[in-house]
Amino acid sequence: MAGGSFRREEDALPAISEINVTPFVDVVLVLLVIFMVTAPMLVREQMSVNLPKAQSGEKSASQSIAIVIDKLGVVRVSDKVVSMSDLPSEIKGLLLSNPNAQAVISADQEAKHGDVVQVMDLIKSAGLTRFAIQIERK
């Protein structure tokens, strides 16, 4: 039978059994680079200098350690006056009883920025990495 339109299975085109993921990986890598470049700019825009008063704020859900810095630079941890040198040991003691605690730093508006940064550095060096700065709502 010459000239028939019957095709054998071996002559048929092979089915595509693989998906090419190269374009997908390229797009994901481009997005990753974009996010890496823009993330520092976004963080810089969110940092506000005038933190003592704000319209909104979140309440912390976990147990917290209250750290208060007055305008003279005196530090209180849970209503107990603590020197800067004793602050890490005090925080370590509180972390033993509650390892998931969060520090809430309440600094007076007239407190020195250096004192607040030093307190944050000391509590981080003591192992407490979760902290928030308390604000007063307008």
Image (spheres, grey):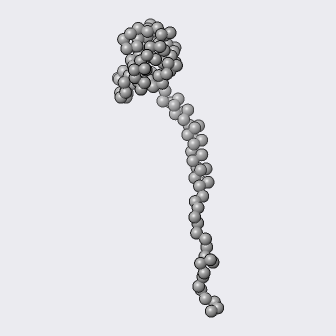
Q: Residue at x 39, y 20 (%)?
A: 97
| Residue 74 picture location, percent across and down | 44, 8
Q: Residue at x 41, y 18 (%)?
A: 94
Looking at the rendering, in which quadrant would you find the C terminus? Answer: top left
Residue furthest to the front in view is 96
- Is 94 above or below relative to 5? above
| Residue 1 picture location, percent across and down | 62, 92
Residue furthest to the right in view is 2
Q: Residue at x 59, y 85 (%)?
A: 6
- Is 28 above or below relative to 104? below
Nearest the viewer among 109 and 64 is: 64
| Residue 71 picture location, percent across and down | 43, 9
Q: Is residue 17 left or right of residue 84?
A: right
Q: Is residue 107 visible?
A: no
Residue furthest to the bottom in view is 1
Q: Residue at x 58, y 59 (%)?
A: 19
